[in-house]
Image (spheres, coloured by chain):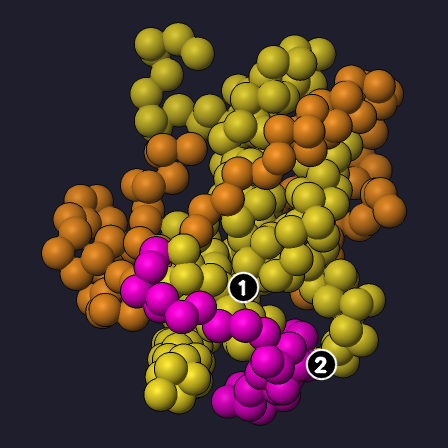
Chain colours: A yellow, B orange
Amino acid sequence: MTKQERPAVNIDGILAQKALAGDEQAFEMLLKRYQTPLFSFIYHFLGDYDQACDILQQVFLQLYISLPKLRTGEPLKAWLFQVARNRCLDELRRKRAVHFSELEGNADEDELSPLDALPDGSPLPEELAEHHDLQRLLGEAIQTLPPRFRAVVLLRYLAQLSFAEIGQTLQMPEATAKTYFQRAKPLLRTALREYTGKVTATRA
Amino acid sequence: MREQRERAPQPATGEREGEEPQEEFDELDRLFIEHLPRLDPPPEVIQRILALARHSAPPLESNAEQQQPPIRQGKHNSDGAGRRTDG
């Protein structure tokens, strides 16, 4: 990258064009730009490390295949997360046989059905204050969210997308993305309270 | 990846230069923003992706018309890239 490239320049587009022209390093740079946020998103969406590796691979290969049709004037971020989210939903459908409507949001938005699917009795950390355990706690709380809320929350917290970008990524109005985010937060609070309560009870 | 921080939901005290107005971020937001782990994929996964791409047929401009543009508003079941092209 040259010094001429200011933040306003669409680095993704430049890299995509170079990759399309056969520049392997450009494709590798694209991977490096997005591997961590994408992998984090996928991992926290699925809660499965090995699956996250597989899905990440699929997403980046999809990117490679799609290079010829990329709109190089637009950032790739929303597209990459859109592909990742769709792959995650596919995986959830396969793995958990979750009903499509449940995943996509036609059901009552306040229901907490995925909570029931959580494995019960997974060992909880005794030292909740430790950072490692806090991270796990947060990840578990994310897993309690309905997938449609989970995607919004992860895109917001992890991928750092604006609500407009989240809407674009998830193909929903920006206002809906905001609404989902706000509805997810009480669920997260509840989940954290439940886990905290369990730990407290265990320790007592 | 640092540039992505530009749009990070900042904690309540965070600056919002050039940002759209956002709602305030509370303790819960801060907790997740600061502590939900960001994970790097295993290096071997990245190497595998690069190897697969290297050994795949190079993407051709002529394929472009056969697929939808990547960032296109569509229905839920689109694959982000429109139609699915892989397994």
Q: Is residue A51 left or right of residue A201?
A: right
Q: Amino acid at mark 1?
A: Ala
Whole-percent x and y of residue A110?
50, 89
| Segment tinted magenta in the rendering | A102-131
Q: Nearer the viewer, residue A146 or A72?
A: A146
Main SS type for the magenta part?
Answer: loop
Residue type highlighted by circle 2: Ser
The quadrant in which the N terminus of chain A is found is top left
Determine if residue A191 is in view: yes
Q: Nearer the viewer, mark 1 or mark 2?
A: 1
The residue under label 2 is A101
**Kind of element beneath mark 2:** helix
Is residue A147 a member of the stretch shown in magenta? Answer: no
Residue found 59% across the figure and 38% down from its top: B41
Find out whether the residues at labels 1 and 2 contact each other: C-beta distance under 8 Å. no
Which chain does the residue under circle 1 lie in? Answer: A
Residue picked out by circle 1 = A151
> Neighbour class for label 2 at 10 Å: few (<14), some, many (≥20)?
few
Q: Is residue B12 left or right of residue B79?
A: left
| Residue B23 is at least partly visible in this image | no
Q: Is residue B3 left or right of residue A77?
A: left
Q: Earlier in the sequence, mark 1 or mark 2?
A: 2
